[in-house]
Image (spheres, helix red, strand yellow):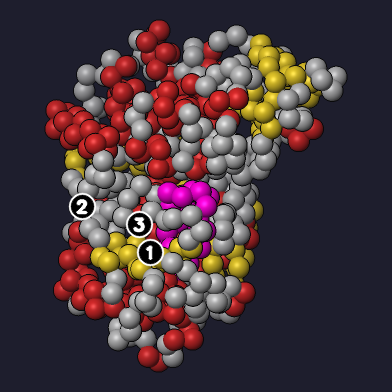
Amino acid sequence: MGKTVSEKILSQTSGTEAYAGDIVVANVGAAMAHDGTAMLAIEAFQEMDGKRLWDPSRAVFVLDHVSPSANENFSKVHKEMREFASKHGANFYEVGSGVCHQLMVEYGYAQPGALVVGADSHTCMYGAIGAFATGIGSTEMAAVFLSGKLWFKIPETLRINLEGSLQPLVTPKDVILKVAGTVKADGATYQAIEFHGSAIKEMSVEGRLTLSNMAVEMGAKAGIIEPDEKTINYLSGLGFSPSRGFMSDEDARFSEILDFNVSDLEPQMACPHAVDNVKSISDMEGVEVNQVFLGSCTNGRIEDLRLAAGILKGHNVKSGIRMIVVPASRRVFLQALREGLIEIFLNSGCAVCNPGCGPCVGAHQGVLAPGEVCLSTSNRNFRGRMGCMEADIYLASPATAAATAIRGEITDPRDLVKPSGVK
Amino acid sequence: MSSLIQGKAWKFGDDINTDLIMPGKYKLSITNLDELSRHAMEGLMPDFAEKFRRDDLIVAGRNFGCGSSREQAPLVLKHLGVSAIIAKSFARIFYRNSVNLGLPVIECKDADEIRDRDSLQVDLERGLIKNLTQKKEYPIKPIHPAVWQILQNGGLVNYVKKHGKLPW
């Protein structure tokens, strides 16, 4: 019987012939924890009498969630993580390096065909390059630190076919919001998603990362895209010699197959307070905002910054509104500097912050006030997400974010830019 | 851990996410568990931590614990004395985290029938929930042996302390 990508990776890493529903113990290729989750893992590791990491070269610690630290408690967490990583010889990414998920790709911990775990729900992002990557908790991360192994129930796979070509200024973010609004917040729980179709083939690897990043917003364990030439070129460009990874067999069994045509798709938005509360932008235009956030593991990459800067160029962020720009990594920041994008953001009146998670988790760099509205390019708009229970968050693309910052109200980017005028 | 659990139901709805169970701003800024627990479920019921009675149960609808992987979400519930969570379904990471902390998570398709403050008796070994208030019984989805082994030992850390090795 044929296998899905998930079945192949979990079979290979567990040394078994496994199919959906089987439980396997698999060898983990890399494991990551950040300043929001690492402390509980370190404490559990010590309680389990852990003496050394199973393989320090495969353990990754990142300071990104509240980075630089905003108060004494965070500072203590950062200090203990630094000391733990140093003592055990693990990989450690200091304040200002970037969002953990972006670093896991840029530094090659995630590769096609690899099994990667992270103590963060958006670990599923590396599925975009053909890894089986999934979020786990802190206690089980401690078990991985001890043994390099973890048990997995092999998920069934929901196949999502995306056909057609996106219109100008309609982005992969709009695609994944449309999909999440259709599949709903628990529509893929316990399952992997595989994204297929001509729209995926056309999509850049950065766009695919945006798609896979949000698979967990439908409850999915992984969001997988078969590696192709684009994947190999992208990873080669980062300095790696990637393997080809795995493709699903023709006779692989899928739990369900969903078809979308993206050719007529309008910009989409997730409205308060759920990621699956998705509407087309034409239904939401005119809603006034106080803050716009461009960044995060979902949309803080160079293509996102290019798209937003292309719209902002020659415009100002509307008076009374603030726009916060956070490149996803130091590499992205440097590239944006070289291309003059940071200058465009600063000239438009944006606040540009250091690479990291920025205001996405509601702990620093743009916490909202009661009654305020934020349009964010991140992945979650739950009540309280950006630090205030009485604030509203809308999720949208970098193009919509830039257009909205200029007008101060939710704006279809196509109203501001004629398609021929972009890039 | 005993396989018999008894207490009153504290009822919540569908898609209860971890930002509602344990807002990120506290999770990241408070390291003391007593203090952190005071904010449990704050987004849904601001005085939950104060009012919740140790050994009672949480009952919810679909997709309980969706969102972030933060283990602080089940951790504060366990710390407040939640004896079990019954839901129509759970988000995957929350489910695993709860098991690893020794907090029973029970899937029951009839969870909607349970009303707020109903008296419940759960028999994990027999796979049955008794609603003493409504005089009804609901079957529960059998707990996987691998999961039961961890729960019975009070979570993964306690398992390792007791057995000197991981269960896998």
Q: Residue at 25% across / 48% down in the picture?
A: A67
Looking at the rendered image, the quarter that the C terminus of chain A falls into is: bottom left
Q: Mark 1 or mark 2, which has the lower sequence index?
A: 2
Q: Is residue B40 magenta?
A: no
Q: Nearer the viewer, residue A165 or B65?
A: B65
Pointer 1 residue: A293
**Side of A19 where B156 appears, left or right:** left
The answer to whether marks 3 and 1 mark residues whose Cβ atoms lie closer than 8 Å is: yes
Label the magenta part by its dominant secondary structure.
Answer: loop
- Callout 3 secondary element: loop
Range of residues picked out in magenta = A376-399
Q: Mark 3 or mark 2, which has the lower sequence index?
A: 2
Q: Residue at 28% across / 19% down in the picture?
A: A46
Looking at the rendered image, the quarter that the N terminus of chain A falls into is: top right
Pointer 2 residue: A97
Q: Nearer the viewer, mark 1 or mark 2?
A: 1
Q: Nearer the viewer, residue A331 or A290?
A: A290
Q: Mark 3 or mark 1, which has the lower sequence index?
A: 1
CA gap, disc 1 and disc 2: 19 Å
Q: Nearer the viewer, mark 3 or mark 2?
A: 3
Does residue B49 appear in the picture of this structure?
A: yes
Pointer 3 residue: A366
Coordinates of residue A319 in the picture (x, y in percent): 37, 76
Coordinates of residue A344 in the picture (x, y in percent): 25, 78
Q: Name the amino acid, label 1.
A: Phe
B67 to A170, vertically: above or below = above
- Callout 2 secondary element: loop
Which chain does tag 2 point to?
A
- Callout 1 secondary element: strand
